[in-house]
């Protein structure tokens, strides 16, 4: 059979039409796609849109966005190669950190002297809903994109510990923090804080200090919040300082809450989680005597891992408790829920121009040679490269 000759003019017109069609389709798809390039280049991800645009193209992915991913490619292998070079140069106890000041999010890897690692994610989680409901600034929580895509890796989210065998343990989750507006009788969550700016104040192999600034409106009174997080190489915790200043013209009353349902050991599982203080482990809901005790935590009886929350300086919380649910306390009831919670509360009133400061240590507990739980002695013997919030 003799093949039919193709008319050159017709072929050219067909190619032109196909090119126009492809360009039109690309332009149409682009018009329907919101492009979110942060500059972090953790990968390239096509997501179902969360706002007006039906599609979103991004170079990063936060915890809580994994179920929106249509397709994507991770750049983690390339980033791991770069990190391997840093590991060779680091040696001993040392810190790695990444921080995006525009978005107010990042990660700090604390390489401990025994070859293990404590990783803290900061504001790398999405709350869902409309655009703009992400946290920005020094807030513990979130994950890297590979973890956001795979529920089996969630132990690596929030604050996470990697042992010498490469196994990950969950230490803290996305921090529960809020301000209760006493006058209006409502809760103000952290994604309602207006993010102003952030900056890395200190960054080297031994110390990382990050600061973020926010504005919060409580009963129509503006408050300025400054948050400072300090990491020290080899120390398995972060010092978190929070300053609240009334920059309005009227007094204001509020309660500041900081706590977490940490799921110590394995993400999403509170079975085997109990409370602990310097007096030992307890299995019931309890309000902790916060003057006598200066820290408390959750211990996982399955893995023997434990966290701690210490309140430092003169500004002590009004109430500290461990219970089955945030904001609820029934002393004597067994700790048996899937949301075992440790919480601290500060009840404050600020006049115009007044400010209050608090300082917390948030981290992983240690065990001595006999297996007894404790916290690092450096928590109460601080030597900071710069003052944090609090005395």
Image (cartoon, rainbow, N blue to C red):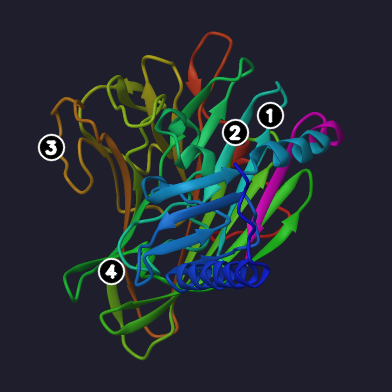
Residue 231 placement, left or right of 363: right
* Gap in angstroms between the C-alphas marked 1 and 2: 7 Å
What residue is pinned by disc 3? Answer: 330
Measured as percent of width and height from the top left, residue 331 is found at: 15, 34
- Residue 279 visible within the image: no
Residue 115 placement, left or right of 330: right
Q: Nearer the viewer, mark 1 or mark 3?
A: 1
Measured as percent of width and height from the top left, residue 369 is found at: 58, 10
Residue 254 image label? 4
* Earlier sequence position, callout 1 versus callout 2: 1
Residue 118 image label? 2
- Residue 335 visible within the image: yes
In depth, the one of 54 and 23 nearer the eye is: 23
| Vertical arrangement, residue 302 with respect to residue 238, above or below | above
Q: Which residues are magenta?
A: 87-101
Question: Where the C terminus falls, by quadrant?
Answer: bottom right
Measured as percent of width and height from the top left, residue 101 is found at: 62, 66
């Amino acid at each position: 059979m003799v093949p039919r000759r193709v008319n050159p003019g017709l072929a050219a017109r067909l190619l032109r039409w196909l090119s126009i069609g492809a360009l039109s389709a690309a332009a149409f798809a682009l018009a329907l796609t919101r492009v979110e390039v942060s500059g972090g280049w953790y990968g390239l991800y096509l997501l179902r849109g969360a706002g007006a645009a039906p599609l979103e193209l991004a170079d990063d992915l936060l915890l809580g966005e994994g179920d929106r991913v249509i397709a994507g490619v991770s750049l983690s292998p390339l980033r791991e190669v770069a990190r391997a070079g840093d590991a060779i140069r680091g040696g001993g106890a040392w810190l790695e950190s990444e921080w995006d000041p525009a978005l107010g999010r990042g990660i700090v890897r604390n390489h401990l002297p025994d070859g293990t690692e404590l990783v803290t994610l900061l504001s790398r989680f999405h709350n869902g809903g409309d655009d703009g409901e992400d946290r920005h600034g020094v807030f513990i929580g979130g994950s890297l994109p590979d973890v956001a895509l795979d529920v089996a890796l969630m132990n690596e989210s929030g604050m996470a510990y990697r042992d010498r065998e490469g196994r990950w343990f969950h230490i803290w989750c996305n921090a529960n923090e809020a301000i209760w507006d006493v006058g209006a009788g409502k809760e103000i969550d952290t994604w309602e804080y207006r993010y102003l700016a952030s900056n890395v104040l200190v960054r080297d192999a031994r110390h990382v200090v990050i600061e973020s600034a926010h504005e919060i409106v409580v009963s129509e009174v503006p408050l300025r919040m400054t948050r400072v997080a300090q990491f020290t190489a080899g120390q398995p915790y972060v010092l978190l300082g929070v300053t609240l200043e009334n920059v309005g013209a009227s007094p204001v009353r509020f309660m500041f809450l900081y706590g977490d349902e940490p799921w110590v050991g394995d993400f999403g599982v509170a079975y085997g989680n109990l409370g602990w203080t310097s007096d030992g482990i307890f299995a019931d809901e309890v309000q902790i005597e916060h003057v006598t005790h200066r820290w408390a935590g959750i211990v996982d009886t399955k893995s023997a891992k434990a966290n701690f929350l210490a309140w430092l300086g003169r500004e002590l919380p009004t109430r500290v408790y461990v219970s089955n649910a945030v904001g609820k306390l029934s002393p004597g009831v067994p700790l048996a829920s899937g949301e075992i919670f440790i919480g601290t509360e500060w009840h404050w009133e600020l006049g115009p121009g007044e400010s209050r400061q608090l300082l917390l240590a948030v981290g992983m507990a240690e065990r001595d040679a006999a297996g007894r739980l404790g916290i690092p002695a450096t928590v109460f013997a601080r030597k900071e490269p710069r003052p944090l919030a609090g005395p």
